[in-house]
Amino acid sequence: MRDRFAGVLSGSSPPDLRGLRLADLPSGMSAFPRDFGRRPPIAQIAPRVSGLAALGASIFVLAAVGHLLAERTGAPLWALALKPVPVLLLLLRVLRAPESPLRWGVAAGLVASAVGDVVIGLPGAFLAGVAFFLAAHIGYAGGFLRAAPSLRLLRAVPFALFGFGMAWWIGEGARELRWAVTVYIVGICLMMWRSAALLGEARLPAGVGGAALTGALFFAASDSLIAIHRFVRPLAWAEVPIMVLYWIGQAGIAAAAVRASRGSATT
């Protein structure tokens, strides 16, 4: 093969490039490296991905702890500014993942939740904040329904019972907000039901349903504490558990979307 280039280098003959391959070029004549076009090995990508994950997790924890400390020490502006940060980080993680049936419904729910985190902390804006969280539940339920369209009505039964029980328990204290509270309970029960419908869905990777249902249950536990604290009796210790349960719930739902995206990327 070097004979084909000898005349070119000496200027005595035109180049004959028929059947020429990049690998046939003599050393030093290729404008591209020998591994041009190859994907970098996973060993080179993994440290960058794990580094970003560690950074995101660190900011998540710092923002969460900072919010709780600001609430405890009477710094409302800091508390309000830091409160949506964990959810916004989860949103960024979901948006960076490949396409999946859950992706946009979960992303919409996280956006609504982040807005609700801020609005519900403003004076006189409790109902407006609740409306944003209701929109989040509807977004999550829509994403879950898109991923698992089968109704699975039997899985709705425990959540319907939970909804009736919660409405009865807080009904006396929530009389002035009866309809708003009822609609919200229906929304969160719908979200839990559709998360349970993901369990065993053949089109989704293993673990998606479990992560979604775990997240939904933690979210419901957080909302239940809020309802008891506001409409039944004040709970002096409730502030930290409410937020921790809420963040774990959001993380579980976001994890379900990311896991579903990984499955889509391999198909």
Image: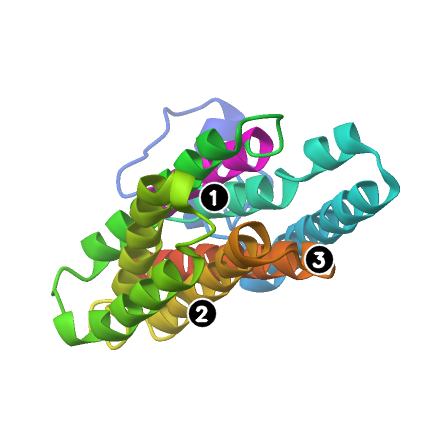
Q: Which residue is mark 2?
A: 214
Q: Give the residues in magenta.
A: 100-119
In this rendering, position of residue 181 left or right of residue 101: right
**Cα distance between the residues tagged 2 and 1:** 22 Å
The x and y percentages for residue 113 are 48, 40
Nearer to us of marks 2 and 3 is 3
Number of residue marks: 3
- First in sequence: mark 2 vs mark 3: 2
The x and y percentages for residue 132 are 42, 35
Q: Find residue 136 and name its label.
A: none
Q: Which residue is mark 1?
A: 96
Which residue sits at x=51%, y=31%?
115
Which residue sits at x=49%, y=60%?
224
**Cα distance between the residues tagged 3 and 1:** 30 Å
Residue 40, located in which quarter of the rendered image? bottom right
Q: Which residue is mark 3?
A: 240
Report the magenta stretch's main SS.
helix
The x and y percentages for residue 22 are 41, 44
**Circles 3, 1 touching at the beta carbon (< 8 Å):** no
Q: Observer-nearest residue: 216 or 198?
A: 216
Give above or below for 119 relative to 66: above
Label 3 residue SS: helix
Residue 163, located in which quarter of the rendered image? bottom left
Q: Amino acid at mark 2?
A: Thr
- First in sequence: mark 3 vs mark 1: 1
